[in-house]
Amino acid sequence: MSEETSEQGTTAPVEGLDTRYRDALLPVFGTPQKILARGEGVRVWDTDGTEYLDLLAGIAVNTLGHAHPAILSALSKQAETLGHVSNFFASAPQIELAEKLLDLAEAPAGSAVFFANSGTEANEAAFKLARRTGRPRILALSNSFHGRTMGALALTAKEAYRAPFEPLPGGVEFVPAGDVEALAAALAPGDVAAVFAEPIQGEAGVQPLGTEYLQALRRLTREHGTLLILDEVQTGIGRTGHWFAHQAVPHVQPDVMTLAKGLGGGFPIGAMVTFGQEVHDLLEPGQHGTTFGGNPLACAVGLAVLGTMWEEDLLSHVRTVGAQFSADVLALDHPLVTEVRGAGLLLGIGLDAPIAQQVAAAALEAGFIVNAPNPSTLRLAPALIITQADLDTFVAALPGLLGAAAPEGEN
Ligand SMILES: *Cc1c(COP(=O)(O)O)cnc(C)c1O
């Protein structure tokens, strides 16, 4: 580490933060890996001054990395003028961000945006909207993740997340992801309000649904008058090298799309986009609401994120560096690496043994932040501004990390 970064990276030491965290915070997240003090671009420093290459970006959130000047400027300018107004009033950033999202989503006339503050809230809004069709059943896919509040949890497949909180809102059924026949059978009675799906299932370990299944999903839902609700909370906002992942798939425009994570580049914001007049009309005045949603600070930052992505042509950058990274990892020809899944900079490295947790831990010790969404997958979702050179350093380190984590004799 250079002297300069060492100096900047070390904040005044704060004693006993580990124990104070344990004493003051609810333990729902387990023990935090490090206490971070500072970030800049794709790097962060912990309270000991140790530097890390941040290949996770707060789980696909910090689109422009840490402390990006465009975000700083948008946030401070907005905070100087108008911070919060409630939804009794509107503000220009809110209107402009809604227009921008509709434009990027190539949404038809009559489309509209509802702003929330997180992914789970965006999905709650979509759940309520689906109920308004009057149809009793809602479908979600196996291995889905849609959030932790009760409605979004009802749409989330993972038993360990659901079971402690039952009863959950009813009417939700799960169909196996990728199985067109099962989907067709479930939709056949014509009483399904909506199907919720993630174009790439992020928490499941970066599992793409695939072009054919997504197209079948669109065709069958349309045939049966069922809403297609795409959860692009993780895949949206350029993460996959397209503004929204579904835009890479011909003829797949959803009826509703939910967004959050990358939209605020680190500032909390979520959004539900409805496509077309018919869906727009499902929620009437007074039927949904939020105090913070559409907050001028959040929307000003969202506009800065989208504007910077546009000016710097980050979508093509994401496609280029993501494809090169995948090719480079496969070219290692490492016996423990089975595949690289995902698109753009939402990447899952499939491992041939349940050692992803250990590899992620070894990576952290070596100065790389990645995570293990399941025992055999390493996930990378770095800031979209990351350079090939920074990605190269991880590719170069990967064989050593796998070696450090693999059980004796397996490497
Ligand atoms: C993270 C995530 C959510 C939940 O978002 P929160 O902001 O944590 O509530 C929902 N859906 C998907 C696909 C996600 O990746």
Image: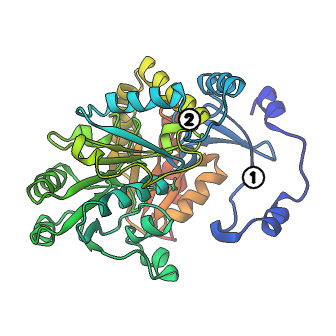
Q: Please state if 126 lies on the left or on the right of 173 as rendered.
A: right
Tell me where residue 13 appears, x and y as whole percent: 89, 46
Q: Splitting the image into 4 quarters, where does residue 29 fall?
A: bottom right
Which quadrant is the N terminus positioned in? top right
Which quadrant is the C terminus positioned in? bottom left
- Mark 2 Cβ and ligand 1 under 8 Å apart: no
The amino acid type, in three-letter code, at marker 2 is Phe
Residue found at x 37% / y 67%? 155
Mark 2 — residue? 89
Residue found at x 22% / y 55%? 227
Q: Nearer the viewer, residue 260 or 116?
A: 116
Toward the top, the furthest residue is 311
- Mark 1 Cβ and ligand 1 under 8 Å apart: no
Q: Which mark is residue 35?
A: 1
The amino acid type, in three-letter code, at marker 1 is Ile
Q: Please state if 269 lies on the left or on the right of 187 as rendered.
A: right
Residue found at x 84% / y 31%? 7
- Please, is residue 191 above or below residue 249 in the view? below
Tell me where residue 318 appears, x and y as whole percent: 39, 32
Tell me where residue 387 appears, x and y as whole percent: 49, 28
Counting residues from the start of the chain, the first of labels 1 and 2 encountered is: 1
Q: Is residue 73 visible?
A: yes
Q: Nearer the viewer, residue 226 or 327?
A: 226
Badge 2 element: loop
- Please, is residue 391 above or below residue 304 in the view? below
Q: Splitting the image into 4 quarters, where does residue 30 fall?
A: bottom right
User: How many circles with numbers are drawn on the protein?
Assistant: 2
Q: Residues within 10 Å of mark 1 (few under 14, many from 20)?
A: few
- Marks 1 & 2, CB-CB < 8 Å contact: no
